[in-house]
Amino acid sequence: METTTHTPTTQNPAAPRVIHTAQLITAMLKSKSHVSDLIFSPGRAPQIEVSGQLVELKYKGLECLSPADTKSIAYDIMGENEHPLRKLDQDGSADLSYGLPGVGRFRVNIFRQRGSCAIVMRVIPDIIPGFADLKLPSTLEEIVHLKNGIVLVTGPTGSGKSSTLAAIIDKMNSEKAFHILTIEDPIEFLHRHKKATIHQRELHSDTPTFSLALRAALRQAPKVILVGEMRDRETIEIALEAAETGHLVMSTLHTIDAAKTVERIIGVFPLADQQSVRNRFGKAFRFIVSQRLLARKDGKGRIAAIEILKSTLRTRDYVEKGESEGKTLLDAMRDGDTDGMQHFDGELEKLLRAGIIDFETALAYSTNAGNFRLEVADFLESGGNADSEGVPAEAKR
């Protein structure tokens, strides 16, 4: 009896898809106006974020990205840059800046999730925004003329902290003939020398840590030092020292308001040191600016609600001695409009009454929802008709 041997047929694996990363990013960026982020995630089409909402872009052949696709895009973006390659391998995520000539610059985070790569790219505007572009309160122009101290801009990721600091630095650059040093991770806005001389140092490529770069900055004769983020106790300690020795130090924190910012600064130090740090920070801080980005009612992008705590005899006293009933930083901001201070709920009320944001948005972002609802009860009872009376120029624009 003859036996027939069947030889199994082997199929050649499909060749990996070739993705032209630069072309894809360019197309995504130009697909709509006001694109803030680009997102590449396995199992989804490429996505952009517009006015806080994700939009899928189903290009032919890229209706659903595979893990191999996102890995290919990630490694295209990293190129031969050793630091992010090593960080992704060791830590599971990597930060870097990425630029396409004539297209744009991006702040990129590549991270591993469920065994594959995902990528988020924040769009960095080509042109440094001005005070008018960002509708910043005129009080913040005082920062340009400060001689020393600490200025903090706070808020969640994506609230516009970097843009606000860039606008302040650019105004200094145009008006002041002195040395400005920035330490960033990564460098976002590129500042060219104007009246000032600006040096920008990037974490990992120019310096290993914020604290080392900040310590070195004290020997580099800057008048102004911008530190991308107050990440640890050592950086905060050196920033205090720099402010106390005649430098103006500007930085960011991921805190939601002025009171939480003070708590975070004090809280990183041991209990035994906290009172002395309170005294030092109370004397050193000049402004704490907190931001929240809100969707506009008309759907045309977002607008910033900004809280401003300014150094006065009263606010310094509250920082140094700690808050108590009737003596809070929020109370000081409510009473401090003549000094240029403002608080979130007051700004949200102005934006609501001007018809720029809706009530649901205002309530969601308010500091004290119960009190806010009471403050705007008359507005809601009248049917919520916008009235621009008493609304500052920043809100009317």
Image (tube, rainbow, N blue to C red):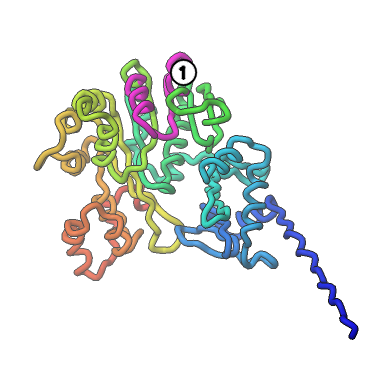
Residue receiving disc 1 = 216
Q: Is residue 105 visible?
A: yes
Toward the front, the furthest residue is 1
Side of 307 relative to 382 (left or right): right
Q: Residue at x 19, y 26 (%)?
A: 275
Q: Residue at x 73, y 60 (%)?
A: 17
Q: Residue at x 25, y 29 (%)?
A: 270
Q: Nearer the viewer, residue 1 or 31?
A: 1
Query: Toward which corner of the image does residue 235 lie, by quadrant?
Result: top left
User: Where is residue 209 shown, x and y percent of the image?
Assistant: 47, 28
Toward the right, the furthest residue is 2
| Disc 1 residue type (three-letter) | Ala
User: Where is residue 364 shown, x and y percent of the image?
Assistant: 30, 59
> What is the span of residues highlighted in magenta in the rendered image?
213-242
* Above/below status of 101 relative to 38: above
Q: Residue 231: say if magenta.
A: yes
Toward the bottom, the furthest residue is 1
User: Where is residue 375 shown, x and y percent of the image?
Assistant: 18, 58
Query: Toward which corner of the image does residue 33 lie, by quadrant?
Result: bottom right
Q: Nearer the viewer, residue 14 or 94?
A: 14
Side of 224 relative to 371 (left or right): right
Disc 1 element: helix
